[in-house]
Image (cartoon, helix red, strand yellow):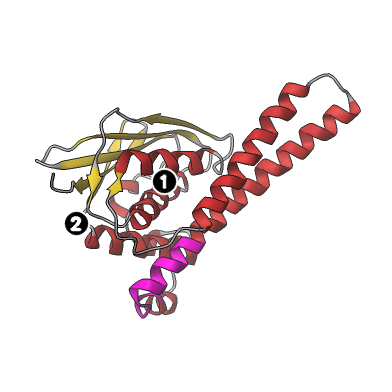
Amino acid sequence: MRARARRMLLDLDEAALLELAHLYCVWRVTRGATHTLNNALTALAGLIEAPGDETLVDVELERCARAARGLTAHHALRFGREEDAELTGLVRRTAALLGDSLGSRYALEVEIPADFFYLEADPARVELLLLVLGYRLVDLSARGGRLRLGVAEGEKPASACVELELLAGDLPEAAAESLFDPAAASGAGAALALEAAGVIAAGCEVSLAARRLPGGLRVRALFPCAEA
């Protein structure tokens, strides 16, 4: 990322930074929804030419509808809501957005426990943080792979952990060291989103860590839970 663009980002106040990062994520979801719509139209055109395979059309149209609903819901996010954030529900919504916007190159797995974890945090900020981390991870791989999202009780008292794990064969060697660095992002939008993720993590007292796995990379976000 160029130094001048970096300085411009640092001049933004927090509200502007979060809103621009939000728009970046809306763009990512929109791009995925457009790709899904194209698949649905392709399937429909094939059915018209050779009728009989209605299942494929139904699948693609349902994916398109889910992507459109996800886009509408995410576009309507508003920061600053005075309510506790329920972490498992936010991870479930993040997984739905990722699943319908990443395309067929990525297999998505979600492990959500029956337990509820409540955070003293703005739900819109937490959702934006998780979405940015998910997009940052998948951007590291050109060939695609398996993306796993999981929620568990944290190792610290009154804490909860979200894990995002990408298994892919073409990850850069220094992926873990540069994962949270906006200067290492592929473009201005991604860099801005990472800046916003850092602001959110600091404001919500979230501890972020990344480490290499055999054939993959794992990100852990440790959240302090709300007092009972």
- Indicate the position of residue 172 as horizontal and vertical percent values: 39, 45
Which picture quadrant has residue 115?
Answer: top left
Which picture quadrant has residue 165?
Answer: top left
Please determine whether, in this image, residue 223 is positioned above or below residue 76.
above
Which residue carries the number 1 mark? 134
Q: For marks 1 and 2, give the one nearer the viewer.
A: 2
Residues in magenta, as a range: 9-23
Q: Residue furthest top?
A: 52
Residue 65 placement, left or right of 170: right
Front in this rendered view, residue 82 or 215? 82
Magenta stretch, main secondary structure, is: helix
Total tally of numbered discs in the picture: 2
Which residue carries the number 2 mark? 205
- Look at label 1 and name its amino acid: Gly
- Indicate the position of residue 82 as horizontal and vertical percent values: 30, 60
Q: Residue at x 68, y 33 (%)?
A: 60
Q: Residue at x 13, y 44 (%)?
A: 228
Q: Earlier in the sequence, mark 1 or mark 2?
A: 1
Q: Residue furthest right?
A: 49
Q: In the image, is residue 140 part of the stretch drawn in magenta?
A: no
Residue 9 placement, left or right of 155: right
